[in-house]
Image (cartoon, rainbow, N blue to C red):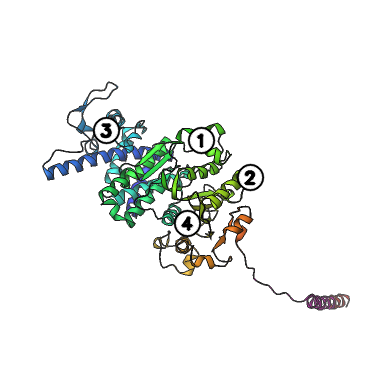
Amino acid sequence: MITGALKSQVDAIWDDFWSSGISNPLEVMEQLTYLLFIKGLDERQTRAEAKANRTGNLIDDVVFPAGEFKPSEGAPARPYVDLRWKNFKNQEPGEMYNLVDNYVFPFLQERTNETSHAEHMANARLSLPKGGLLARVVDGLSEIPMTDRDTKGDVYEYMLSKIASSGTNGQFRTPRHIIQLMVELMAPQPKDTVCDPASGTCGFLVAASEYIRHHHPSALTTPKLAEHFHNGMFQGFDFDATMLRIGSMNMQLHGVENPNIAYRDSLAEVNSGDAEAYSLILANPPFAGSLNYEEVADDLLAVVKTKKTELLFLAQFLRVLKPGGRAAVIVPDGVLFGSTKAHKELRRILVEDQKLDGIVSLPSGVFKPYAGVSTAILLFTKTNSGGTDHVWFYDLEADGQSLDDKRTPLLADDKLGATATGLTDEEHAKNNLPDVLARWTERNGSEVERERTAQSFCVPKAEITDNDYDLSINRYKEIVYDEIEYAAPSEIIAELEVLEAEITAGLADLKAMLDA
């Protein structure tokens, strides 16, 4: 958990950007990502040097070799050692700017083939307008203690939260407590291959990696599992280069060495070679958009003939999941009850051909202040042979924050999130997330017997089929209305007659007084 002091240090750096005229939060985040990557290279070299000193061996991971670096654009050569963070941070602003702009950034661009993180630096450029700002930002980042993975991850997550709080481009961020809920529901395993086809800042992949660290620590110490964790487990795709850089850095600072974070339009024909490649999908894909048929992979259109991205992504999830693979994805409510042929066919496929496990209906304020659209979490398993006996529904009414534009926390930190414990009934009324997890584990047990008036319940497949595969919770939820007893009409009329008589008598008395 990031402390108030760390937040203040990050806020000060952010304010330096704004006061220097850089007000686009994504540009701020991108520049910070570059600088943190540069700082990380120096730290990597320092660790390699320390290891060599301990063992007496040669440095096995040389980032900054002996000799000089010669930029391709004709600037004079400089010793590689000058390019290290620990050295240029002590230069005066003008010289620091010259070193970073003319040497460090070209150095980054020459290293793009080394790791998946480095390849996103291919078009890196320094957009800070002057040396004074660069010096203040470098000083600020140097003062933030980022020696351990947890602190690095927390600091970067806090920086990312400022993208959302700025009111610009907040659509790139799914609320972290909702991501946590979805990851906990899916419970990733060490041998999973996890994919987010619309990865953005890689929030789902980061949360999945943290789940593995917490619940399966041996995955980081067993050589074969550790190799998979760092090099094959996490796959994220996006077609925004800035988001790829940010997402890749997010993964790196959370300790994943070489995830596959790649430029890809997940719905395009050219990417149709990853069928049945992943065992777990976690995603909040873009919706309320449309594509031209020519831009979409033919095998997706064979499943569902539509231009709507939310339906195309669902078809894509089914295509890339392995048999037995699971998915937790956010969809707009229209997917659950839309009346078009494409809507109905996708729901039929989920219910009849695959195994639709559950639907968590989210309150409409979850994505405020950026969108008020109603959404749900769709939970399913790819089987290609059916398996839906019943579908579990949960009506999530409170997520721990106010559902207005401010999204103010309603409870103490230890009572927020999906893993909070010991909530009272009053606290549950403000945070339903732990209850979702508890009831999910009983979806094939006690939940089957719950009344439709409860917050969660199960609906048999046959009933869903009879309702044209409508998956809206309101179709099946029963509401109990309090009975209100009214007096008999004759009693009401008698009371009115008494009142009328009293009014008439009062008026008569008043008239008599006025006439006297």
Q: Gap in Å between the C-alphas at discs 4 and 1?
A: 42 Å
Residue at far right of view: 515
Say above or below: 442 vs 214.
below
Q: Are marks 3 and 1 in contact (CB under 8 Å)?
A: no
Give the quadrant of the N terminus: bottom left
**Which mark, by number, is residue 279?**
none
Residue at far top of view: 74
Q: In the displayed structure, does residue 259 sit left or right of residue 349?
A: left
SS for dot 3: helix
Q: Which of marks 2 and 3 is in front?
A: 2
- Answer whether residue 292 is visible to the viewer in this image: no
Q: Position of residue 99 (x, y in %)?
A: 26, 30
Q: In which quarter of the image is residue 199?
A: top left
**Which mark, by number, is residue 340?**
2
Dot 1: within a 10 Å radius of its alpha carbon, few (fewer than 14), some, or many (20 or more) residues? some
Q: Give the range drawn in magenta.
A: 481-506
Q: Does the magenta stretch include residue 485?
A: yes
**Which mark, by number, is residue 297?**
1
Q: Name the dominant secondary structure of the magenta segment.
A: helix
Q: Do the residues labelled 4 and 1 touch (CB within 8 Å)?
A: no
Label 4 sits on residue:
408
Label 3 sits on residue:
96
Q: Position of residue 425 (x, y in %)?
A: 48, 69
Q: What residue type is labelled 3?
A: Met
Q: Quadrant of residue 244?
A: top left
